[in-house]
Amino acid sequence: MVAIETKSDKPVDVQSGKLLIRLAESEAEVKASQSLRYEVFCEEMAAKPSVEMVRLRREFDSYDGYCDHLLVFDGERGEGAEAVVGTYRLLRREPAAKLGHFYTSSEYDIGPLLSYPGQILELGRSCVHRDYRTRSIMQLLWRGIAEYVFHHDIAVMFGCASLPDVEPSRLALPLSFLYHHCLAPPELRPRALSERYVDMNLMPKDSVDTKDALRALPPLIKGYLRLGGFVGDGAVVDAEFGTTDVCIVVKTDLVTEKYYRHYSRDDAVVGEASC
């Protein structure tokens, strides 16, 4: 069992042993999240940084100033920015309206989501330091997202999630599984922009081995599916990040009862999430 303590009435403020998860509270902490993103996306993975990103060793874009940045801190590494070991970027409807669009709209027509009544939340730029990629860290990140969802009364979460390859034919099994088994209902279904649309129906349904397909999916996408998530119509190749993206949609009233039991504010102790 992992003891988790909700510390205050902030949108997110949770302690688990030496780890703390909350929103960034300073420019230095936002920059720390960008530095972690640079390390993971640009140095470990295939993202192509700009000259300015290389100079500053931070991965950033115009969306950062409009987002909340969910951060995991390890108290043994210090205090504040130097202790950041995990991050998620969160963008709600109102800040996105000020910016003019969501990040996902650069890849997908998200009209059905924009038309949905209530609060919507875009999730993105999720990453964890290489030394902290454990189940407990992901559990804590999801606890933080749950706190944020409850605080802002989020109805729908969505965002682009990546498979690590730019050749969809090599991803035929997981993409076909998502197409045949996980398409969002029409009233919530984003569609890849026509100029970027990649058909996910690459294998007949009866040729898709579910167990093999699930093994081929990245852990983050499997995590969304366990929460009752769906995918949009079509994949998108993101050459800048060296990935093939799908659009994830999670309607929060469809999230399993177990998720709420594990992550509601009323729970003082949270068990290991079963996967």
Image (cartoon, rainbow, N blue to C red):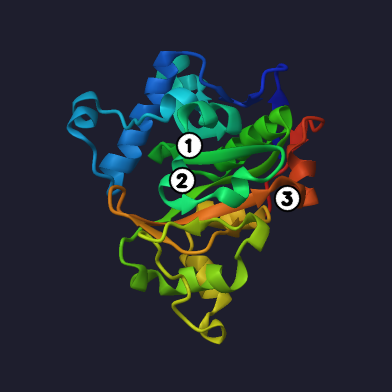
Mark nearer the N terminus (1 vs 3): 1
Q: Which residue is mark 2?
A: 105
Residue nearer the viewer, 241 or 215: 241
**CB atoms at circles 2 and 3 under 8 Å apart?**
no
Horizontal side of 182 relative to 203 (left or right) equals: right
Which residue type carries mark 3? Val
Measure how far apart labels 2 and 3 are at the Cα level: 24 Å
Dot 2 crowding, Cα within 10 Å, few <14, some 14–19, many 20+: some
Structural distance between the alpha carbons of marks 1 and 3: 26 Å
Q: Nearer the viewer, residue 252 or 76?
A: 252
Q: Amino acid at mark 1?
A: His
Task: Count residues near mark 1 (Cα–Cα under 10 Å), then give few for <14, some for 14-19, many for 20+.
Answer: some
Percent position (x, y) of residue 179? 54, 70
Question: Quick one: label 3, few (<14), some, or many (20+) residues within 10 Å?
Answer: some
Amino acid on which the number 2 mark rests in the picture:
Ser
Residue drawn at 43 percent across, 23 percent down: 65
N-term mark: 2 or 3: 2
Q: Position of residue 136 (x, y in %)?
A: 58, 40
Q: Quadrant of the C terminus?
A: bottom right
Secondary structure state at the residue bearing disc 2? helix
Q: Residue at x 67, y 57 (%)?
A: 187
Q: Name the residue at 35% across, 55% down.
A: 243
Q: Which residue is mark 1?
A: 101
Q: Which mark is residue 255?
A: 3
The answer to whether the residues at label 1 and label 2 have Cβ atoms under 8 Å apart is yes
Q: Where does the N terminus fall, quadrant-wise?
A: top right
The residue shown at (40%, 69%) is 171
